[in-house]
Amino acid sequence: MRRLAERQRDFAAALLDAGRPLPKGIVGPDGEPSAKRFAVYRNNVIVGLIEALGDAFPAVRRIVGEDFFREMARAYFVREPPSSPILLDYGDKFADFVDGFAPAAGLPYLRDVARIERAWREAYHASEAEPLDAAAFAAIGPDRYPELRLLFHPSARVVRSSFPAVTIWRMNVADGVPAPVDLAAGGEDAFVVRPRAVVEARLIP
Amino acid sequence: MPPALSSTLPRAIPPRAGVGLKPQHYSTIIETKPDIGFFEAHAENYMCAGGPPHRYLGAIREHYPLSLHGVGLSIGADRPLNRDHLARLKSLNERYAPGLFSEHLAWSTHDGAFLNDLLPVPYTEETLARVCEHIDEVQDALGRQMLLENPSTYIAFAESDYAETGFIAEVARRTGCGLLLDVNNVYVASTNQEWDPIAYIEAYPLASVQEIHLAGYAREADEKGRSLLIDTHDRPVDEIVWDLFARVVARIGPTPTLIEWDAAVPAWPTLKAEAERAEAIMLAGEREGPRRAASC
């Protein structure tokens, strides 16, 4: 019998579902079961992931507040537990999840703020590539322009919004100061890119 | 140790104190070049195509010895190792040629889900065989020796028939891996399991230890009012852990020692002061001896 496989199956199931009983034979120092001790693992898993999401979506967290964010992140974890040990990638479906998260329905722009933050994160970790400036084209005659094939920088992302999402995002990151925003003022589209070391989120005119 | 497969030669980690590398300190480190023995990076935080983390890590690697610490390989899992993850570790090891590479005696992946914690294993023959098989695979894939870290644990498995120290000694013997002795984990696990931490250290295969970790823990209580220590890495090293560290140093001499402070990360001077304290203990131990025979 492969006990280790069973152990880990039962341990993982109890870890992910707090409603399940403690697996047998998981004990404290007196050889008796201890739910409180097992709960340390449950707590570590969820708290670590909530923090990882909070780091990736600081403006969303600031907009909804710590308590709301924690519950939203917990619900996301139940739906989308990470499939990779690389937590830098965790949260790739968070914006869509936020869009369908009923308690956040009163904040229709929240999904687009999350999309900007996800684009920012992806741009931050994207491959390096030397951006072209105007001088790069100087040596190329206009007759050869039809042969040119231009590629976006690997960090480039576009986020389109029917809300002033860029304005809202800027107000809620770093030392931004939140202020009243007219949601009916029209949409804003963001061009997020990291030409070299610094991620820029530009408003597309 | 077999040579690294990289064209860059690994720079040995000196028997000094180092600190865990945090993004909050990148610019202070680059701008002020503090005198510190080494930096240790979490491998998973650099598993990205490009961007500032690689720029900073590359710049820091130019000036300091670097060790690499994996937190997600799930060596203790019954399932096969994630080959993609192993390939990513290999690529990072080749790129940065760290002086030491370490991972945990723990599992964290099951059925494709990453469980985001270092989960404990039962100390049985079956686990021993599986862990050794995985460590052999890691050392083959990376072309180097790895260090295995002892866990902080909150529960025990009724079926365990090895003491943790005996289990780890047997893993080191069978695989030839080195060991990373986390002294805070010794204290956390010993308190939680009602072991004697001094007896733990006496029983530990100290001859295989190539690195030490120190960190802070939080004290809670279980449902029976017994101390339940949590390995939080969010505060200074506790006095009792410093004492245990001094005891280890008295036995094995100065050894690369890392201060881990991963949550509620303090300002640089606070972290640096912890490293200085570790170095002072190692220097005092050197003056007072006894020392590891090999270094006499």
Image (cartoon, helix red, strand yellow):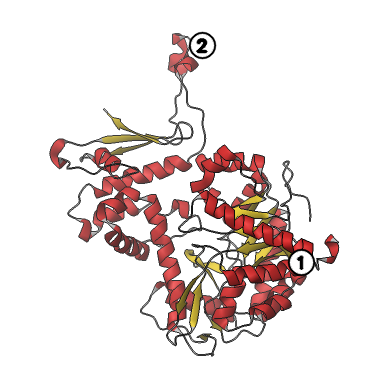
Callout 2 touching callout 1 (CB < 8 Å): no
Q: Residue at x 55, y 54 (%)?
A: B271
Report the chain holding disc 1.
Answer: B
Type of amino acid under label 1: Ile
Q: Is residue A87 left or right of residue B93?
A: left
Q: Is residue A161 left or right of residue B99?
A: left
| Distance between the alpha carbons at the discs numbered 2 and 1 | 65 Å
- The verdict on a common chain for dots 2 and 1 is no
Q: Is residue A69 visible?
A: yes
Q: Is B48 rendered above or below residue B276? A: above
Of residues A131 and B111, which is closer to you in this image? A131
- Image coordinates for residue B185, horizontal then vertical, percent: 59, 70
Check disc 2 and report the residue beneath it. A139
Of residues B159 and B275, which is closer to you in this image? B275
- Image coordinates for residue B21, horizontal then vertical, percent: 56, 51
Q: Residue at x 50, y 90 (%)?
A: A32
Check disc 1 and report the residue beneath it. B252
Q: Is B153 rendered above or below residue B293? A: below
Type of amino acid under label 2: Ala
Please tell me whether mark 1 sits on a helix, a strand or a loop.
helix
Residue B291 in which image quadrant: bottom right
Q: Is residue B78 visible?
A: no
Q: Is residue A81 left or right of residue A127?
A: left
Q: Is B262 rendered above or below residue A38? A: above
Badge 2, how many Cα within 10 Å: few under 14, some, many 20+?
few
Q: Is residue B129 left or right of residue A122?
A: right
Q: Residue at x 59, y 79 (%)?
A: B190
* Residue A32: mark in rendering: none
Badge 1, how many Cα within 10 Å: few under 14, some, many 20+?
many
- Image coordinates for residue B146, horizontal then vertical, percent: 70, 60
Please tell me whether mark 2 sits on a helix, a strand or a loop.
loop
